[in-house]
Image: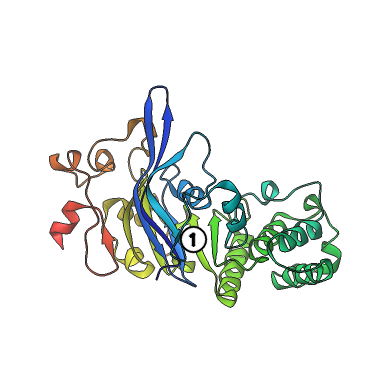
Amino acid sequence: MALLELRSVRVEFPNRWGTLVALDDVSLELAPGETLGVVGESGAGKSMTGAAVMQLLPPPARIAAGEILLEGRRIDDLPAAAMDKIRGRRIGAIFQDPLTSLNPLFTIGDQIEETIRTHLPVGAAEARERALNLLREVGIPAPAQRLSAYPHELSGGMRQRVVIALALCAEPSVIIADEPTTALDVSIQAQVIVLLKRLCRQHGTAVLLITHDMGIIAETADRVAVMYAGRVIEIGPVDDVVRRPCHPYTKGLMAAIPRLHRSERRLEQIPGAMPSLADIPPGCAFHPRCGMAVENCSRKVPGLHGRGLHRHACALAAEAT
């Protein structure tokens, strides 16, 4: 049984002019201990997927169809009080800017200890000992001193390590990591990704890793889902998708990654831009930017094709295989 499952989830933004669709028929599964990468350009629906799982959709967004299940139990229809008990305890979160994730008015120790005591039946002394061990585990130097520090007294990399400790402190079964390295220097990014991967394997925690960086996905994820205009357009084991992409959009993403052995002076690029929610094209949403598109591509939304675990939503690619 899947640990986390999204079944045909649709997220809408109703407004005075009609309804905008942010997620359309999104289905994903996350197994215990697995890292599933979700990748795509800005506006593809990656962060909206994570927000839907945690019921943190910005108003007036709503889940209009589909189901979200955690350990076989439906959670998308839970009242706010019940979801508060799951958020943090069963589902942890790591966001891209650690300064917005940490309260500037409280010390690091206060924030970790409060989270532990909110979700676990432990006393103050045990909570403090757990907080100290977590800071040590995530590689914070002089952890006993850092417990008394405020967020602004730490570097960006150290703050993100604290956020990882916060996400793990209640021993969740799933972590939603939304662009966890975007605000960090490149050298620190690699350290944080290695740390997150190691800790989640040690704790047996599954990770939904949301990013625009295919390099991070290739190094970290077990499987990858590529999103475009609110839909999953390719999904499969990371080696298959990275080395043998099927959908033209995925091929474009892979071709745009710089490689040391290439002699070209210019990087390849995908023409055009991601459509806005108010202007998603009919049929395959990628067809205005696709060099393979034919007339039928603008008429019908393709479903996921393929054999085994590697599937893609391109009718032309399906015919070629």
Q: Nearer the viewer, residue 155 or 39?
A: 39
Q: Quadrant of the C terminus?
A: bottom left
Percent of width and height locating residue 78: 51, 50
The residue under the point 72% across, 68% down is 121
Q: Nearer the viewer, residue 230 or 159?
A: 230
Relative height, residue 99 to residue 89 (above, below): above
Left or right placement of residue 104 versus residue 15 in this view: right
Q: Nearer the viewer, residue 171 or 268?
A: 171
Q: Nearer the viewer, residue 147 or 64?
A: 64
The residue under the point 79% across, 57% down is 108
Percent of width and height locating residue 52: 48, 48
Percent of width and height locating residue 117: 74, 62
Pointer 1: what residue? Answer: 208
Q: Quadrant of the N terminus?
A: bottom left
Relative height, residue 79 to residue 319 (above, below): above
Left or right placement of residue 198 versus residue 42 in this view: right
Classify mark 1: residues with Cα within 10 Å, few (<14), some (14-19) or many (20+). Answer: many
Residue 4: name its quadrant: bottom left
Left or right placement of residue 142 versus residue 312 in this view: right
Percent of width and height locating residue 228: 35, 47
Q: Quick one: SS at disc 1?
A: strand
